[in-house]
Image (cartoon, helix red, strand yellow):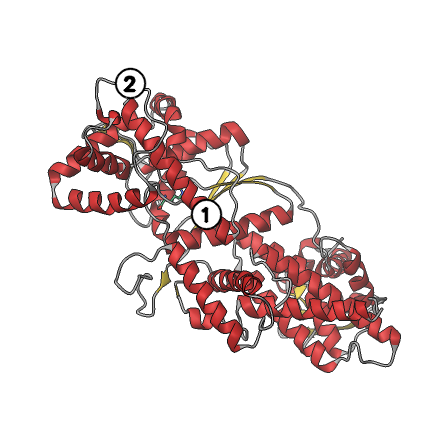
Amino acid sequence: MTPLSGVVSGLVADAFESAGLARDYGSTLPSNRPDLGQFQCNGAMAAAKKAGRNPRDLAAELVEKLEKQPIFSQVSIAGPGFINISLTDDFIAKHLAGLADDPRCGMPGPSEAMRVILDYGGPNVAKPMHVGHLRATIIGDCLRRIADFVGHDTKSDVHLGDWGLPMGMLINELELTRADLPYFDPASSGPYPSESPVTLEDLEALYPKAAAACKADPARLEAARQATAELQAGRPGYRALWQHFVDISIASMRREFDALGVHFDLYKGEADVHDLIEPMIADFKAKGIAEESSGALIVRVALPGDKKEIPPLILLKSDGSVMYGTTDLATIVDRVQSFHPELSLYIVDQRQHLHFEQVFRAAKLSGIDEGGALEHIGFGTMNGPDGKPFKTRAGGVMRLHDLIEMAHGQALTRLSEAGLAKDFDEEEKNVIARKVGIAAIKFADLSNERLTNYIFDLERFTQFEGRTGPYLQYTAVRIKSLLAKAEERGEHPGALLPPVDEERDLELLLAGFPDTVALAWGKREPHHLCDYAFRLAQAFSRFYQYCHILSDPNAELRASRLALAALTHRVLSQLLDLLGIEVPARM
Ligand code: ARG
């Protein structure tokens, strides 16, 4: 169905057209000055400038036309030529009745469905996932949910870090302590044991040890480089060992992602595109965009108008090993071959912006992207109370797993403080606390503009009041229990009657759901959904406070208000689903 803003825009566009001006100027949105009108059109100023007319005169002419529309209750001019419009209550009720019947809560299908790749999560093999990966995971998963809902054809890829120097460090570290393992015999080409020689715990201990050794000793670093180059070149023992590392890591990552309710279509990694690298480099060379420079192979990506220096992208180092940018480019080739994406979103820390700028430029230069759009969706850091990237008390990297456990613990405390879930058994309480803890983390992360840094404050995030995930969950549960109570009494949602003030506010907000989703998707900014969800919950509270629902003596009014509560519940549930937040059955 057409969103309410679209209906109004259409009529305003008609008015512009009949004044001999382009329809585009008629674009009208929910007003941020509801005291002046429910909707606002700013097009008269630009249209007047184009036509060489006085903007207020033009606005007055348009207002005269618009006042003839029977669905508008009020049309007025403000300032230099803003047009404010309000709708009749009858029309609002009629539109809402259509919304209540629409399974997509008023969201129209996309004008053009695109094939979209979303690259997020990005954990690295053998390293525990940390809070940086948390942001990539939460924002990426939310954008994927939004894109799916809008109607695009999406594919999500975790893009494991599994082909760089850390792999050589691990191999070298293990070789020093367990030289007897068959993987290290240069004369052997397998077969190798199917059982891994190391556990996840071993692996997680091995990496920091190897990294410290490489930092302290240049010879160790050189050996790790050598092992990386041999792994990439296909040394069978190294490949077999590496496969164990990857399998163990993926199994552990899946557990974390499951806990977060996040899913990936593809568990591909940097290594998966290894065989595409050689032909890709040949193609780059043939096109004359790869050149040698002090033994390395590079692509110059700087452009004449650059404000800051963009260094060349390194395709191959002098020892022949490939770089992060090389695998990212070959991944573009892979995705184009298998999916032909029209849009690729890379949800990765903003500190990697330069890397993506280089990769995208090299992709465009070579044409390997086949014209698909490539966007880096950056985000800021999650900081501790000291304003620095979040660490454990001991100063180490905070593991994702530990963070989720902390949130769970805090959610249990909050539930008991708020007197919620108190009569439920321990198991149910735990399930609820898990959902509340995750909701707290996700909402806090998504409710900021992506690029801002924020301070991790579990105390605040888990509160059942204010702008939090738990508050929204609680609101959804409350509305649901109201609806269930009505059902028990044999009361059903019915036809919507023209609204009183609190109802009208809520209804206009509900009608704005499709605009909000379109805005969040267009800007790739989930926080618009969070703002909107919070405003919706507050508008519902006011409605609930001032309008009797079950206790009103008038049966038609009860049925109308129940219908409004039911629609609010549906829109709020849809929003929470888009944010990746699960609502407990009860609390
Ligand atoms: N593994 C990388 C990291 O931990 C993130 C990968 C992001 N995706 C990509 N296509 N480069 O920093």
When asked about the image quadrant of residue 63, the answer is bottom right
Dividing the image into four quarters, tell me where ligand 1 lies: top left
Q: CA distance from mark 1 to mark 2?
A: 33 Å
Q: Position of residue 483 (x, y in %)?
A: 75, 68
Please name the amino acid that badge 2 sits on: Ser
Q: Position of residue 163 (x, y in %)?
A: 32, 34
In the drawing, does residue 101 fall left or right of residue 364?
A: right
Beta carbon of the mark 2 residue lies under 8 A of ligand 1? no
Mark linked to residue 139: none
Q: Earlier in the sequence, mark 1 or mark 2?
A: 2
Q: Secondary structure at mark 1?
A: helix
- Residue at image position (31%, 19%) is 190
Please name the amino acid that badge 1 sits on: Arg
Q: Which residue is mark 2?
A: 189
Q: Which residue is mark 1?
A: 255
Question: Do callouts 1 and 2 mark residues in contact (Cβ within 8 Å)?
Answer: no
When asked about the image quadrant of residue 203, the answer is top left
Above or below — where is 536 with respect to 110?
below
Q: Is residue 388 visible?
A: yes
In the drawing, does residue 521 fall left or right of residue 455?
A: right
| Nearer to the camera, 19 or 297 | 297
